[in-house]
Structure formats: C-alpha cells, structure tokens
Image (cartoon, rainbow, N blue to C red):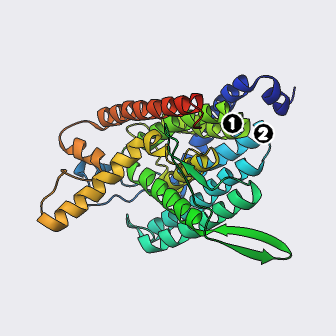
C-alpha cells in the first residue's frame, strides 16, 4: 500500500509512522552530519556575557537545523504530497531556515556569537511574511478573519486591501492581515530563537507544541498538516538524542528560526493564530522576560531577573541545565494541553 493510501485508510497510524520515520532518519543521519561539521571546524561561539558554565560549550558543532529541515522535508514528501496549505508551512520553514543559515554562517566566518543585525532579520522576516500572506489569501484562500477563542468575537482584517495584477493574474493584498501575520511570524521565530539557550530546551518544547498542532490539524481533517507537524516532532525527538545535555550538536539559528517559522505557519493555516499565545506560552514567557528586563533596567537601572531570557535566571539560581530543561518541558505541556482543550471546547461550542 502506498503512503497516500495509508493516509486515507489509516490516518492515525500514518501520523504515528511519520513520527517514527522522521525520528529514525534523524538518528541515522545526525552522526554523519556531526562528523562533517567537526571536520570543517564549524562550531558554536558562546556569548561571553552569558552564564559562565556555557563557555565550555564553545566549539560544539552547530547548524543542526540544516539536518532538522532536511529530515522534515524528506519525511513529509515520503508520507504525503504538497497541497495549498502544506505549501505555506513548507515555504515558511525553508525561508526562515535560510535566514537562520545566513546568520549561522556569518557567526562562523566572523568568529563571534552575534550574526546578522536585528534590523536586517526583521526586514527579511517582513518579506517572508508577505510571501506567506500572499499564498494564504490567494492560493489557499484562507479567511482573513481572526477569531478569539471561547468567544463570539472575531476581527476581519481583510480591509483595506489592494489588488496587484501580474501577468494577467490578480492578487489580493489585505494590508492589515499582512501586518498581523508579520507580527505573528516575527514574534514566534524570535521567541523560539530566545528559547534555544539550553541543551534540549528548544527541541523538546517544539516537539510538544508540534504534537498539539498535529492533534488540531487531525481534528480539522487536514491530514497533510498533521503529517507535517508529526514530521517536525519526530525530527526534534531524534535530534534530542544528540542535543540533550551535554549536547553533541546545536540546532543554531537555522533550526530555531525554521522551527519558529513552522509553528507560526501552522497557527495561520489552522486558524488558531491567537490560540498560539496559549499553546506556545513558554515562548511568550521567554520573550516577556527579555522585554521586562530591558524596560525595567532602562528605567531603574535594576534587574528583575538574574539574567534574561528567564531560563538563564534559573541557571544562575543554581538549577542544573537538565532541571531547567525538564521543568520547562512540563510547563510547555501544561500550556499546550490547555491550548488544545480551549480549541476543543471552542469547536464544541461552534466557535472554532
């Protein structure tokens, strides 16, 4: 039986098989990729103002995100074909991965922990968001209505809009909706990037979030999206074998930005944009800790946290990396579970 036939007859089995295929593929390919990176001397540069215990991680192979993206694409294409909705999540993941790759390469070449300047990243994310928006509105014909979970409130961001004609084809450009998508994509990618500060933290939290989106997509009968989310989850689980403390490889910005881009795109195509705030609550906490730290310090010259993002705060308090990682996974599970429960209740009430 073909993978496509399995999807139609045994969708839940196919999703499980997707996770296993991605996990095994990652487990097999990761040692090869790690040896290649070591041979080329492609290692992580550590920020000197971070936790002092992290300085010993300098030189650990990075750009594991390249393998994560490759594994996801391979697994997805084996298990399913590309449709209008899955095209959006694939484009988002690849585009943000390429942005992260440029950032990682610049760090390696310049031998420092800082890559592209923030304004260039935000500009490129703007272009990526526009591409996602054009695909969403004109190719997938997604609604520009944003619904508030558990309520009857919704906001139609379809106006104002422009019409662009290219080679005889018309493209709708609802600017408010595109601005909203930019905030969503830029916020999610940067939040996941902030979370990628401890061994296994980002990969573990993304696994939980992706399994939640797989459940939502399955509930919506969007099996292609469920398979994509399952492929990402499986790849992250396989990556954790080599990324758990002490890490043999880091995902780098290539991985964290790609995973953030994939999460944002899944929220867009499943129309759970605002629910992402709950499902990805751990990323909201990480980002808020940085925002609060910066604002309070500028106003009072005092720090709320020992160090931001907040996972470093607990490190400095004496928690081991493993303890922080596991407890943040648990918190992510609580947020994701709450998010799925809210989604399910909304559907039952006819709000979803």
Q: Quadrant of residue 81?
A: top right
Horizontal side of residue 339 vs 323, given as left or right: right
Q: Quadrant of the N terminus?
A: top right
- On the question of residue 132 being in view, the answer is yes
Sequence-wise, the earlier of marks 2 and 1 is: 2
Query: Looking at the picture, how far across and down is residue 312, in whole percent?
Result: 27, 47
Query: Looking at the picture, how far across and down is residue 179, in whole percent?
Result: 53, 66
Q: What residue is shown with label 1?
A: 227
Above or below: residue 285 compared with residue 176: above
Residue neighbourhood size for the residue with mark 2, other residues' Cα within 10 Å, grouped as few (<14), some (14–19), many (≥20): many
Horizontal side of residue 193 vs 71, given as left or right: left
In the rendered structure, are the residues bearing label 2 and label 1 in contact, judged by CB atoms less than 8 Å apart?
yes
For mark 1, give the secondary structure. helix
Rendered residue at 24%/51% (across/down): 51
Query: Looking at the picture, how far across and down is residue 183, in whole percent?
Result: 48, 61
Q: What residue is shown with label 2?
A: 80
What distance separates the C-alpha of mark 2 from that of mark 1? 7 Å
Q: Nearer the viewer, residue 93 or 174?
A: 174
């Amino acid at each position: 039986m073909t993978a496509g036939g399995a999807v139609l007859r045994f969708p839940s089995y196919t999703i499980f098989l997707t996770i296993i295929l991605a996990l095994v593929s990652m487990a097999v390919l990761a040692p090869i990729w790690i040896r290649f990176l070591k041979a080329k001397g492609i290692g992580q540069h550590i920020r000197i103002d971070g936790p002092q215990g992290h300085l010993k991680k300098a030189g650990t192979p990075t750009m594991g995100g390249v393998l994560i993206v490759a594994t996801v694409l391979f697994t997805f294409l084996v298990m399913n074909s590309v449709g209008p909705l899955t095209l959006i999540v694939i484009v988002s993941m690849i585009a943000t991965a390429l942005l992260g790759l440029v950032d990682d390469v610049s760090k390696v070449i310049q031998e420092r922990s800082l890559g592209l300047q923030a304004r260039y990243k935000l500009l490129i994310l703007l272009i990526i968001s526009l591409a996602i928006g054009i695909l969403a509105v004109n190719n997938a014909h997604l609604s520009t209505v944003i619904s508030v979970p558990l309520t009857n409130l919704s906001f139609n961001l379809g106006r104002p809009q422009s019409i662009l004609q290219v080679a005889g084809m018309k493209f709708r450009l609802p600017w408010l909706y595109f601005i909203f998508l930019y905030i969503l994509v830029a916020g999610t990618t940067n939040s996941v990037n902030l979370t990628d500060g401890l061994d296994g933290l980002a990969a573990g939290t993304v696994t939980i979030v992706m399994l939640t989106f797989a459940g939502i997509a399955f509930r919506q009968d969007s099996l292609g999206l469920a398979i994509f989310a399952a492929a990402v989850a499986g790849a992250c689980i396989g990556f954790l074998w080599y990324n758990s403390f002490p890490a043999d490889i880091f995902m780098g910005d290539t991985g964290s930005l790609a995973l953030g881009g994939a999460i944002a795109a899944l929220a867009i195509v499943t129309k759970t944009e605002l629910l992402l705030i709950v499902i990805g609550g751990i990323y909201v906490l990480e980002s808020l800790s940085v925002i609060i730290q910066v604002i309070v310090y500028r106003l009072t010259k005092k720090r709320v946290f020992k160090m931001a993002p907040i996972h470093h705060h607990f490190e400095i308090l004496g928690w081991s990396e493993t303890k922080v990682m596991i407890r943040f996974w648990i918190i992510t599970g609580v947020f994701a579970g709450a998010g799925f429960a809210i989604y399910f209740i909304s559907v039952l009430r006819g709000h979803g």
